[in-house]
Structures are given as C-alpha cells and as structure tokens.
Amino acid sequence: MRAAWGTATVAALGAMLAPGLAHATGVSAGTLIQNTATATYTSGTSSGSVTSNTVTVRVDELLDVAVAGLTTTPALAGASNVVLDYSITNTGNGPEQFNLAVNTAVAGNQFDAVLQSVVVDTNGNGTYDPGVDQVLTSGQPTPSIAADGSLRVFVIVSLPGTATDGQTSQVQLSATAVTGSGTPGTVFAGQGQGGGDAVVGASTATQSANDALIAALAAVALTKSASVVDPFGGNQPVPGAVVTYTLTATVSGTGQADNLRVTDVIPAGTTYEAGTLTLDSAALTDANDTDAGEASAAGIDVDLGNVAGGTSKTVRFNVKID
Amino acid sequence: MNKFLIAAVSGLLAGMAAPAVSAQAAQPVELKGDVKVVKVVIENGQEKIVLIDPKVVVPGDKLIFSTAYRNAGAEAVKDFVVTNPIPAGVALAPLGADKLEVSVDGGKTWGRLAALKVSDAAGPRAAEAGDVTHVRWVLPVLAPGASGTLTYNALVR
C-alpha cells in the first residue's frame, strides 16, 4: 500500500516535468533528486511487491556568469559624464551576488576614461536614473541575482583632460561570483545555495565585457575684424566715422561647444549705434529679452547656446567714433 | 488476505524493534538502490571515466541509478517487474535509452522510446529521452538465489 502511494506521487511529478528540459541553467541548487524502484512479482499463488531504499542526490550550486556590453555603438564623450550600459546574467542555478570591477585601462586605448561611479539599475527600467538607481560603493557586490536572472549595470565615466577629439577608448566591466571563482570544477564545500557545495562552472564564475566610447570634443576660435566708413565716403577712422565690428566664432571638432557666449566692450572714444546688433545677419534687439543678444553703451553680449562642431556664428555691431 | 496482513504487521514491527528475520521471510525479493556520478578525470595525461559517490552534483552531470535485486527466498519468483519512475530534476540520458522499456505517460503505456509519441503545443512528435517518465524491466523468472543489477543513465536537468 505504501509503495503504491509513493509510486503514484512520483509518477505525477514526472509527468509535470516532462517533456523537455525546462530551465536553461538547470535545476535549482539545493534540489533533492530522489530515486526509488518498485518491483512486483508472483511467488507460488500469491503476488507481492517490494520497494527499494530511496537514494537521494542533492544538486549543488553551479557558479556561472555572463557579462555583455550593451553600448553597441561607441558612446560620444564630451564635457558631461558618459553612461556605459552592461548586463550581468547569473547563468548558474542558484541566487548569487557578484563583485564588480571596472578597468578603464584596456589595452589599445587612446585615452583612459575616468571612472565616476558604478550604478545598478534598481528600478529595472533600462535607463540610468540618478538618485533612484543604487550606486555601488567600492568593493560592494551587486544585489543577489536569481538563477537565470539578469541585472543591468551602468558605469559612469568622464573624459580625462588629456583626451583629444576623435580618440577612442574601451571600458571593461568584470563580474565575479561572490562565493568564489576559478578553474571549472573548483568546489567551495558547504557554500552552495540550499546547503550543498558550490562548484565553479564553465564560465570560471568570472566574466567581463567592454563598452567603447569616442571623445567628441569641440574647439572654438574667435576672430574680430573691423571696417570703417567715414562721413566723406572714405575709410578713415575720423570722428563721425562708423566702425562695423565682426566677431566670428568658429566651432571645430566632432563634439559641440556648450553654452557659447560672445561678449565685447564698446571701445573708449566710440558710441554704440543703437539697433545695429546682428547674429548671422539677423537683427537682435538691444534689450535683454527673449532673443539671443543684448547691447548697451557698455558692450554687447550674445548667447549662442550649444554650437555643434563644423559651424560658425557671426555677430556684428556698429559704433560711431566720437 | 490474513497472511498478507500478518506480513505487513511484522514488517512494521521489524522497522521498529523486532528482529529483521520476519521481514525477510515475508519479502523473498530484495531491492537495493544506489546512485553514482560519472566523472571524467585526467590521469597521467589520459582521460579516464570513473564512477564515484555523488558528493558534488551540478546540472549537466551524468548519474547512474542502479537497483540490485536478489531472490532470497526458497522458491522461484515469476513475472518480476521492476518499475522506476524517473525522479524530478533528472532526464533519462539519450545514450542507452533505446535499450530500455520506457513510458512517456506516467506509466500507463510502455514500449521502446523510438515507438512512442508525445503531444506538445505543436502537436504530436516522436518522444525523446527527456520525455520519459518511467523505466521498467521485466524478468519472467527469478530462480532462488538469482541476483542482478538493473541500471539506467540520467542527466541532471
């Protein structure tokens, strides 16, 4: 009777699990595999059944990890911080924490980025949310990642002052199982999830991946020229002559110049001619209002905002020689 | 019926404190289960397959489950059928599966793996080793004193 009940129970379990191998990374650490055989027979006129002892195998924890760089096209690094995107997948069969290490000095780098912080995508939205996503302090492991689970990690870096426009660099993130790593098959006795051992898998329980960035910098050149028209139809800087100043800001490089602003003072002995301020030949009011520029007897001030590399901006204004 | 009841009761007693002799008399056949894990070790630069006690087992490992039987009684035993459900967490290994009598439906129907079919979302398909729910061995007669070992290979899922 007992044997029959046991057989029926195990049969139901078997039916639930079949067919196919359900999990990519296998049965969970700590699972007990229990095998029992039952025999039926006849002996003379009676029949009987006998059940074997149950043999039990506990599944140990496999330590495995995969790391991928998700920044597929090199990130453009300018004046502000760059967010590099990685994923860490626990390919083992038990929940595991991982120690992270960032290497900014990858062989072949034209510059080495400056590490700012390592951040976990706490809210799982795939986007770096400052103040929301958890910053890992140095030496702090990731939160526990479930078997088969993935964790998004952001590495925040900035450009070093020595980087020049167009230079490339790679940043390597490596993840190592907290329980241990090493040659596949290395056993950490008693340290597995569920009371068993932990065993290093084929990944050696430590893996890394690179993300790339490109320095996208801009250089600004400013030139100033003057042309004079005198009241006599000539070009002499005599009292009453009008001087047109031309300021040209040229931005070069693949990046952009942020918050570019052109200012100039009205030279002594001259007077600003009201209403002559222009930006790229378009008139600007003298007042401090919604347009980009303002002008007064003291000087001019034109806010060009962010200017992409490869463009130039021209500011003009007139003064009259006193 | 009475005899069976007595046998059951004496078996229970044996399990508690009574001498084991009475239990053996009630069960002429003994079954003893065992499991080994198959590991490849490198010895003197050569790969060697060894069977060891399953101290460390991880997904993908190969296990050999065995059931030793022995007719300890004085009379021949007939229609000896050993049924072994495949435990949760392992799959029957493809290697050698074709030589076993198996079931893919929880023990309702039996046959060679190649002759069995299972249905999944995509419809009926040929059964694979991973679909097997039970294995069994049928021995027509066990003479008194006859013994042997029945084994199947399994992979930890």
Image (spheres, coloured by chain):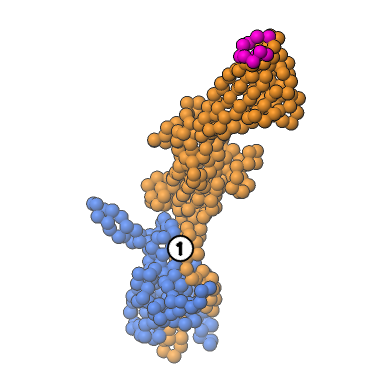
Chain colours: A orange, B blue
Residue B132 vs A196, above or below: the answer is below
Residue at x-position 63% and y-position 11%: A237
Residue at x-position 49% and y-position 44%: A73
Residue neighbourhood size for the residue with mark 1, other residues' Cα within 10 Å, grouped as few (<14), some (14–19), many (≥20): many
- Residue A28: x and y in percent read 51, 58
- Residue A37: x and y in percent read 44, 73
The C terminus of chain B sits in image quarter: bottom left
The magenta span reads A230-239
Q: Secondary structure at mark 1?
A: loop
Residue at x-position 48% and y-position 53%: A91
> Could you say which is closer to the camera, residue A135 or residue B36?
A135
Residue at the far bottom: name it.
A45
Residue B53 appears left or right of A257: left
Residue at x-position 37% and y-position 82%: B139
Q: Which three-letter amino acid code belongs to the residue tagged 1?
A: Arg
Residue B123 appears left or right of A201: right
- Residue A239: x and y in percent read 68, 9
> Could you say which is closer to the camera, residue A135 or residue B15?
A135
Residue at the far front: name it.
A232
> Could you say which is closer to the camera, residue A295 or residue B72?
A295
The verdict on residue A125 being magenta is no
**Residue B131 seen in the figure:** yes
Disc 1 target residue = B157
Residue A23 vs B129, above or below: the answer is above
Residue A44: image quadrant is bottom left
State the predominant SS element of the stretch in magenta: loop
Residue A315 appears left or right of A207: right
Chain to which the residue tagged by mark 1 belongs: B
Residue A305: image quadrant is top right
**Residue A189 seen in the figure:** no
- Residue B128: x and y in percent read 42, 73
